């Protein structure tokens, strides 16, 4: 059984591969297909973008396709950057640019008002065209300064609830035990089993 991950983001692919390592599926990415389509993420929310990416890749490859659209929602900013998380500081913004913009907008905001949520929406389309959409969230707060070198994106400025370390100060295994992506993928695996997409492949 093959599953195509519909993202060019290497950091997401690394986490998704690890989180699906208990399934007997071969994970394929854009590197396995010439002319893999680039999908414009112009949906009004994470679900629309995830479905758009999964549908495009399922159609292009004819295989089981999985897309992840995710973002950070900061309470003091009314839920921003949300669906604009990857381009918060501009179209070609780096992770660092986005973190700097976030920290400067939150300058002077006290710890109790720095609450935030990481949200991950996973869309899966099987070769028969059946669609599954699931969501995982991880609550936490935005730190005053970036801490840690692991992870990606907003990980250095996000401290999950119940931890004094940021995601970037955790190992991949630790982050994968509690992250929004881990929770969404757990639900995705359950849904795939119910649809019997994974049956006969020794999935656990
Ligand atoms: P998209 O899902 O490709 O639209 O982009 C999601 C953006 O949200 C990424 O570029 C990151 O900036 C951020 N993001 C999503 N998931 C994570 C995560 O697990 N850690 C840190 N940042 C994340």
Image (cartoon, rainbow, N blue to C red):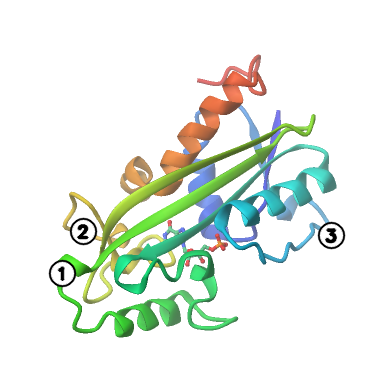
Assess disc 2: are there few (<14), some (14-19) or many (≥20) residues with their C-alpha within 10 Å of its C-alpha: some
Ligand 1 lies under 8 Å from the Cβ of mark 2: no
Indicate which disc, 1 or 3, sits on the residue closer to the N terminus. Answer: 3
Q: Nearer the viewer, residue 143 or 24?
A: 143
Which numbered disc, 2 or 1, marks the residue closer to the eye? 1
Which residue is at 48% across, 50% downward?
120
Tell me which numbered mark, 2 or 1, is placed earlier along the sequence: 1
Q: Residues within 10 Å of mark 1 (few under 14, many from 20)?
A: few
Q: How many marks?
A: 3
| Image position, residue 107 (x, y; %) | 24, 84
From the top left corner, tell me how far across and down residue 164 is, in percent: 16, 57
Q: Residue at x 79, y 59 (%)?
A: 37
Q: Which residue is mark 3?
A: 35
Dot 1 beta carbon under 8 Å from ligand 1: no
Classify residue 81 as left or right of residue 160: right
- Residue drawn at x 64%, y 60% as measured from the top left: 8
Q: Secondary structure at mark 3?
A: loop
Q: Which mark is residue 122?
A: none
Name the element at disc 2.
loop
| Crowding near the residue tagged with mark 3, few <14, some 14–19, many ≥20 C-alpha atoms within 10 Å | few
**Spatial CA span between label 2 and label 1:** 15 Å
Helix, strand or loop for disc 1: helix
* Residue tagged 1: 111
Residue at 59%, 19% in the rendered image: 194
Is the residue 26 above or below the residue 175 in the image? above
| Residue carrying label 2 | 165
Q: Quadrant of residue 23?
A: top right
Q: CA distance from mark 1 to mark 3?
A: 47 Å
Image location of residue 119, percent across then percent down: 44, 53
Q: Are marks 1 and 3 in contact (CB under 8 Å)?
A: no
The residue closer to the viewer here, 68 or 13, is 68
User: Which is in the foreground here, disc 1 or disc 3?
Assistant: 1
């Amino acid at each position: 059984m093959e599953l195509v991950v519909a993202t060019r983001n290497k950091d997401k692919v690394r986490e998704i591969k690890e989180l699906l390592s208990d399934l007997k599926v071969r994970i394929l990415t854009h590197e396995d297909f010439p002319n893999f389509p680039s999908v414009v993420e112009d949906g009004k929310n994470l679900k629309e973008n995830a479905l758009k990416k999964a549908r495009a890749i399922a159609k292009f490859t004819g295989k089981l396709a999985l897309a992840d659209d995710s973002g950070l929602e900061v309470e003091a900013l009314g839920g921003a950057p949300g669906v604009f998380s990857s381009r918060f500081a501009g179209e070609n913004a780096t992770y660092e640019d986005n973190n700097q913009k976030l920290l400067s907008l939150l300058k002077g905001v006290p710890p109790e008002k720095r609450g935030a949520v990481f949200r991950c929406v996973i869309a899966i389309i099987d070769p028969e065209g059946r669609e599954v959409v699931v969501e995982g969230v991880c609550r936490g707060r935005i730190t005053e300064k970036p801490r840690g070198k692991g992870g990606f994106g907003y990980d250095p400025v996000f401290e999950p609830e119940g931890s004094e370390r940021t995601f970037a100060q955790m190992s991949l295994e630790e982050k994968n035990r509690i992250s929004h992506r881990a929770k969404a993928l757990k639900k995705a695996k359950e849904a795939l089993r119910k649809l019997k997409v994974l049956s006969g492949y020794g999935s656990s």
